């Protein structure tokens, strides 16, 4: 198994009795009419049933009086016990001898068809089935950081899947497989290019290419979006300015937008990274983010599209804590954004670190719909060699309570708009997908793509249930192996943070490539690109004081949240060094001093990788040999690199703590210089 089929593996079910039961319930498919999306639903169901049950299921125009089949019904007014299905929701119910999939839209039926397949793949009974599900968030997008030359920024799974030089004439069959995978988990939008955007996509040539991609996505209910370069009017438009208030600039964007909609009538809209990390933006002309976003919203006019404006900004002249800068720039703009614009905020205040407190903007901009941006590609989480299942990390953010409107105002409820009642809501995952045969490099990386889609659809699902579901669909249906694998998955993020950045350490990774440890990094183009800026190790202790005595970034949160994190004695250890400079000798809630706890986490974290290896070895008989060997090899690398992190960090921090490695752990055999040399090798050009 080369992993290409992802979780949509439709291998013949071994259990004859079970197979017969499913066959009896799915003898035909009816109700598709002429709609392309319903046709897709029928074809996908047909293909899945053919594989799983070994029977060719006919697609009929109508069921007439037949029983024992699957009926599609589109009904915008459909409800379940009096509660209407939300847009794109579905219900699957056994009715009059058939399985009826009712969608509140055509896409709803498509999602229902994939849900029915999921039931069968995970061996759930169809007798008396009655389940319904509706998406809690409206715009569920993947963000590709793909460049026109085929590279992927922070991509670790090969090159881009988009073949720009072949488009629009040749459509790689992979595009359709990509669309089907996304639709199967409810993803309904794809930003095709890097936020550090090229102006190329706004030219007629590239609009034509993007239109060709859109034609593959459309029957799967997926819309395409573009990241745009703010300076495009200058770069390709022949204008001398990109000032959002300049009428010529407005005209230019309006004309481009109309041109795009001419070619792609269901185009989704724009994603913008502006005045961030050197990208151009409205501030270049003395305007602000709202001026920029609103101008694009105007350019969209009556077209059904949106603008997602990113809040990932930190000014060149920081006041000493990058943590606060996005908040300082965006909070005052709340209320200024026009309808159709959303502000896209990363899960945490710095930058996709192994663990971050939730971004203080969540709950602080009640008049602006916020998109939550998470990263599936493991830029700071071990690339494609470390097994890190990200659902627990996403859940940690989603379930965090902002207290914006009292207890229970979780980040999830802020972004699904239930806290502030916005008409639109969105979530974005930076894709981990590339041209590797198995899409994600690490076979287990597929689970992160899967989990993102499932949580975007329903953030109340648990990490555990998603892990089990994915494992059963992708790796094995053996109950004990599923338990073992899901257990490793659910613990993997905690393990990763222990051997890399425990206790709330952050941003101590290798410079610019972001690979491996480099806590000693003290000079860079910007102070906030170094490690010492963040960990602040000295003779006294470790960590960034963000209380009122320090940068007071903590003051950006509601009092209830401040209370949680304000006292180093009660602050959860996982967030401790995010907010406090703690003496090395300070006893923590765990009973150990900071130094001893730090060492304990580095050592037990690295040793837990050995445990992961053992667990994985134990399920070998239940896993396809090719996939098993692949993961086995990557786990070896992970163990090697975990030791590297451990040794680098304990040896480096020891130069400040001046204490021995506590028993029962043995000091590293190599020296700090040995490891510095390793890091340097990875940074050679
Ligand atoms: C950082 C990445 C950089 C991205 C940036 C962003 O290192 O490549 O361009 O995020 O999100 O984490 O804009």
Image (spheres, rainbow, N blue to C red):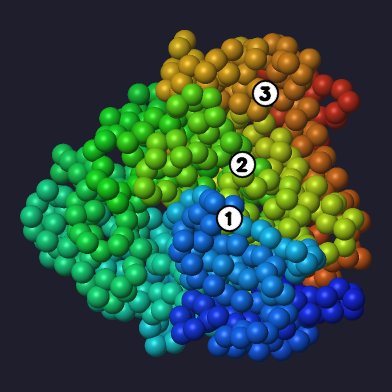
Quadrant of the rendered image containing residue 363: top left
Could you say whether the residue bearing mark 3 is in a helix, strand or loop? helix
Question: Residue under circle 3?
Answer: 573
Observer-side mark, 1 or 2, equals 1
Q: CA distance from mark 1 to mark 2?
A: 27 Å
* Residue 25: percent from left, percent from top: 75, 76
Observer-side mark, 3 or 2, equals 2
State if disc 2 and disc 3 touch (CB < 8 Å): no
Residue occupying the point 21% across, 69% down? 258
Question: Residue under circle 2?
Answer: 395
Q: Is residue 642 visible?
A: no
* Residue 270: percent from left, percent from top: 32, 58
User: In the rendered structure, which disc, 1 or 2, sits on the residue that comes first in sequence?
Assistant: 1
Could you say whether the residue bearing mark 1 is in a helix, strand or loop? strand
Question: Residue under circle 1?
Answer: 80
Q: Is residue 18 visible?
A: yes
- Crowding around mark 2 (Cα neighbors within 10 Å: few <14, some 14 to 19, many 20+) is some
Residue occupying the point 81% across, 54% down? 485
Closer-to-camera residue (93/259): 93
* Residue 528: percent from left, percent from top: 44, 33
Image quarter (top left, top right, bottom left or bottom right) of the N terminus? bottom right
Q: CA distance from mark 3 to mark 2?
A: 18 Å
- Crowding around mark 3 (Cα neighbors within 10 Å: few <14, some 14 to 19, many 20+) is some
Left or right: residue 321 versus residue 353 is left
Residue occupying the point 30% across, 73% down? 265
């Amino acid at each position: 198994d080369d992993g290409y089929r992802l979780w949509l593996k439709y291998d013949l079910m071994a259990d004859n009795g079970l197979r017969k039961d499913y066959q009896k319930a799915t003898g035909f498919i009816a109700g598709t009419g002429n709609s392309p999306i319903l046709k897709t639903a029928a074809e996908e169901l047909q293909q899945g049933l053919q594989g799983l049950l070994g029977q060719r299921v006919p697609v009929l125009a109508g069921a007439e009086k037949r029983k024992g089949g699957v009926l599609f019904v589109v009904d915008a007014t459909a409800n379940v016990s009096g509660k209407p299905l939300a847009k794109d929701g579905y219900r699957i119910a056994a009715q009059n001898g058939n399985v009826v999939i009712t969608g509140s839209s055509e896409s709803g039926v498509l999602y229902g068809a994939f849900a029915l397949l999921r039931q069968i793949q995970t061996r759930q009974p169809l007798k008396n089935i009655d389940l319904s599900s509706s998406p809690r968030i409206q715009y569920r997008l993947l963000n590709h950081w793909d460049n026109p030359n085929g590279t992927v920024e922070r991509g670790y799974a090969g090159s881009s899947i988009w073949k720009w030089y072949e488009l629009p004439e040749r459509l790689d069959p992979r595009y359709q497989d990509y669309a089907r995978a996304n639709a199967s988990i409810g993803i309904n939008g794809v930003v095709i290019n890097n936020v550090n955007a090229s102006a190329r996509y706004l030219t007629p040539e590239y609009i034509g290419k993007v239109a060709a991609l859109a034609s593959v996505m459309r029957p799967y209910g997926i819309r395409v979006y573009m990241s745009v370069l703010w300076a495009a009017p200058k770069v390709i438009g022949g204008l001398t300015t990109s000032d959002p208030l300049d009428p010529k600039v407005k005209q230019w964007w309006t004309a481009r937008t109309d041109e795009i909609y001419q070619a792609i009538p269901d185009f989704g809209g724009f994603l913008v990274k502006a005045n961030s990390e050197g990208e151009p933006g409205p501030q270049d002309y003395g305007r602000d983010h709202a001026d920029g976003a609103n101008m694009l919203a105007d350019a969209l006019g009556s077209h059904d599209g949106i603008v997602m404006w990113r809040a990932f900004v930190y000014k060149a002249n920081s006041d000493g804590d990058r943590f606060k800068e996005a908040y300082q720039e965006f909070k005052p703009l709340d209320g200024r954004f026009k309808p159709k614009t959303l502000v896209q905020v990363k899960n945490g205040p710095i930058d996709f670190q192994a663990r971050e407190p939730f971004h203080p903007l969540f709950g602080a901009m009640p008049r602006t719909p916020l998109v939550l941006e998470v990263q599936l590609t493991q830029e700071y989480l071990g690339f494609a060699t470390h097994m890190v299942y990200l659902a627990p990390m996403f859940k940690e953010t989603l379930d965090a309570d902002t207290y914006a409107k009292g207890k229970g105002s979780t980040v999830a409820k802020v972004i699904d708009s239930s806290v502030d009642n916005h008409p639109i809501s969105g979530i974005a995952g930076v894709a981990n997908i590339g041209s590797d045969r198995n899409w994600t490099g690490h076979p287990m990386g597929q689970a992160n793509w899967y989990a993102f889609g499932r949580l975007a659809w329903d953030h109340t699902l648990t990490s555990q249930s998603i892990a089990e579901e994915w494992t059963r669909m992708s790796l094995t249906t053996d109950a004990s192996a599923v338990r073992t694998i899901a257990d490793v998955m659910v613990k993997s993020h905690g393990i990763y943070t222990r051997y890399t950045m425990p206790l709330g350490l952050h941003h101590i990774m290798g410079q610019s490539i972001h690979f491996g440890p480099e806590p000693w990094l003290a000079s860079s183009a910007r102070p906030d690109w170094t490690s010492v800026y963040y960990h602040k190790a000295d003779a006294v202790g470790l960590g960034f004081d963000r209380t009122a005595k320090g940068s007071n970034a903590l003051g950006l949160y509601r009092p209830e949240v401040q209370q949680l994190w304000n006292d180093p004695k009660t602050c959860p250890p996982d967030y401790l060094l995010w907010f406090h400079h703690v003496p090395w000798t300070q006893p923590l809630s765990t009973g150990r001093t900071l130094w001893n706890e730090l060492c304990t986490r580095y050592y037990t974290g690295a040793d837990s990788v050995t445990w992961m290896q053992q667990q994985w070895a134990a399920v070998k008989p239940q896993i396809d040999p090719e996939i098993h060997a692949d993961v086995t090899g990557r786990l070896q690398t992970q163990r090697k690199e975990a030791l590297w992190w451990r040794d680098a960090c304990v040896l480096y921090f020891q130069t400040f703590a001046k204490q021995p490695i506590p028993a029962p752990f043995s000091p590293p055999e190599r020296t700090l210089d040995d490891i510095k040399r390793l890091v340097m090798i990875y940074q050679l050009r």
